[in-house]
Image (cartoon, rainbow, N blue to C red):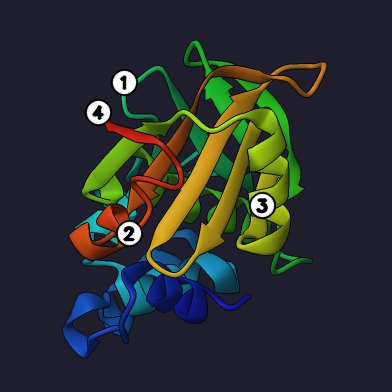
Amino acid sequence: MEIKTLAERLLGRQILTNEGTKNSEIEKVELKYDLKLPKSLKDLYLFAGKNTLLLEAFNRFALPAQLEISDNKMVFLEENQNICYWGFEIDKNTNNPKVYQLINENEWYEEQVLLNEFLTIMLYYQCAQGGYEYCATSGITFEDLDIFVHTEWEDVVRYNGLQIYWKADCLLWYVYDKENKIVDDLYFSARTQEAYKSHVQKYELEEL
């Protein structure tokens, strides 16, 4: 899915022209480092670079002027507690480079996804972890969960212990372990109060 389409899906509306970063700001970065930003990241800036819900609700995306290169990685995302950072490998031969995580300031670990998929994961996670205003735990059984996710939800993220399902204005998500068992709780996040209220009874929601 293209970044603009994904952003509009998550926002529940069309992107506004003033929500994007000016192309001239991106060109300054490209000139500074003598490279072209990967299309997926460039599109994120062009269409939603000023949208705080998508770029700052949980983890924090660097603004174009804040992009820096370290160990041949362009650092573009900061974890919400400043524990780690993410960067993509500088590779002029691809428009969809590898993503790496920086831990302890000098240890880079390769993520098992490329940049376009990583951005998709992060944008869904931004909304799940605070971007959407209405959040709750769900008390449904595993049997009900299995039925609901196959009949009502779209499976959008399954990566590195994180599972997220989507339907309009809503996210259903959890963290899983190596045995594919849910760790902690099953969570529900809704963009609107109307969407939240319509799921309270069926999904046995308890507001956080």
Q: Which residue is drawn at 23% across and 89% down?
A: 17
Categorize mark 1 by other alpha carbons within 10 Å: few (<14), some (14-19), many (20+).
few
Cα gap from disc 2 to disc 1, whole angstroms: 33 Å
For marks 4 and 2, the one nearer the N-term is 2
Classify mark 1: helix, strand or loop. loop
Give the CA separation, mark 4 to mark 2: 17 Å
- What secondary structure is found at the residue carrying circle 3? helix
Amino acid of disc 1:
Gln
Query: Residue most toward the right?
Result: 179
Quarter of image, res 78: top left
User: Crowdedness of circle 4 by 10 Å Cα count: few (<14), some, many (20+)?
Assistant: few
Callout 2 secondary element: loop
Q: Residue at x 58, y 74 (%)?
A: 39
The residue that disc 1 covers is 81
Dot 3 or dot 4: first in sequence order is 3
Which residue is drawn at the image coordinates 66% and 52% (left, top)?
149
